[in-house]
Amino acid sequence: MIFPKNNLSNVVFSQIKHLCYSGSMHIDTLEEIKEQFPEIKNVNIIHKKKLSNLEHLGLYVTNHVGTMGFFFIILAWTVLWLGWNMLAPQKLRFDPYPAFVLWLFISNLIQIHLMPLIMVGQNIQSQHAELRTENDYQTDKKAEKAIETILLHLESQHQFLEQLLERVEKLEKQK
């Protein structure tokens, strides 16, 4: 049975009003969710702005020393140095075989200076990773709350539709 438009809209409106204002379930609004969680910021920019010049240097060294290009430079330098001092004419050798004292000294200096710089760079990278992790966690918490709110809205709408359907069926039986 089809009801006249006025009767049905009055019934629907009164049911919506009853369900929405009955206070049985509170569903957060978008504004309430925004108030509960801080604004998501780009931690990459924040992290870069906080770095000093020395920290930038540490990161630069860490990022460039830990590459295959740097490895090949050191490998080529070592092969050339050792090869020259083993195979070149005796008068042109400057770091005699088998000791290679100068090569060992320079290699140790490079290592001694690069190790602390690499460690500083790794600490800075670790701090950046912690900032990104915290930011990801906050983003996930906000997304979880938004999903929960959407599911509550859907559940509320489902309950409303069931109740509305039951009432419409009752009205149809009465007519």
Image (tube, helix red, strand yellow):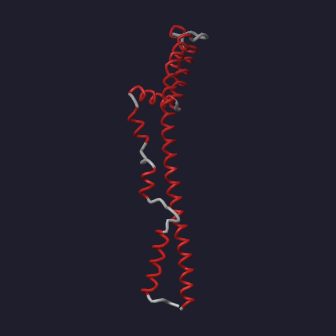
Compared with 97, 131 (above or below) is: below
Tell me the residue at 53%/67% (across/down).
154
**Residue 136 vs residue 48, the one in the foreground:** 136
Residue at the far right: name it. 98
Q: How many marks?
A: 0
Compared with 98, 117 (above or below) is: below
Residue at the far top: name it. 91
Tell me the residue at 45%/27% (across/down).
58
**Residue 103 vs residue 11, the one in the foreground:** 11
Percent x, y for residue 86?
58, 14
**Residue 78 vs residue 40, the one in the foreground:** 40
Question: Toward which corner of the image does residue 10 lie, by quadrant?
Answer: bottom left
Compared with 7, 91 (above or below) is: above
Percent x, y for residue 114?
50, 22
Tell me the residue at 41%/25% (across/down).
54
Percent x, y for residue 28?
47, 59
Tell me the residue at 53%/54% (across/down).
144
Percent x, y for residue 108?
54, 16
Question: Toward which corner of the image does residue 100 lie, by quadrant?
Answer: top right
Compared with 162, 85 (above or below) is: above
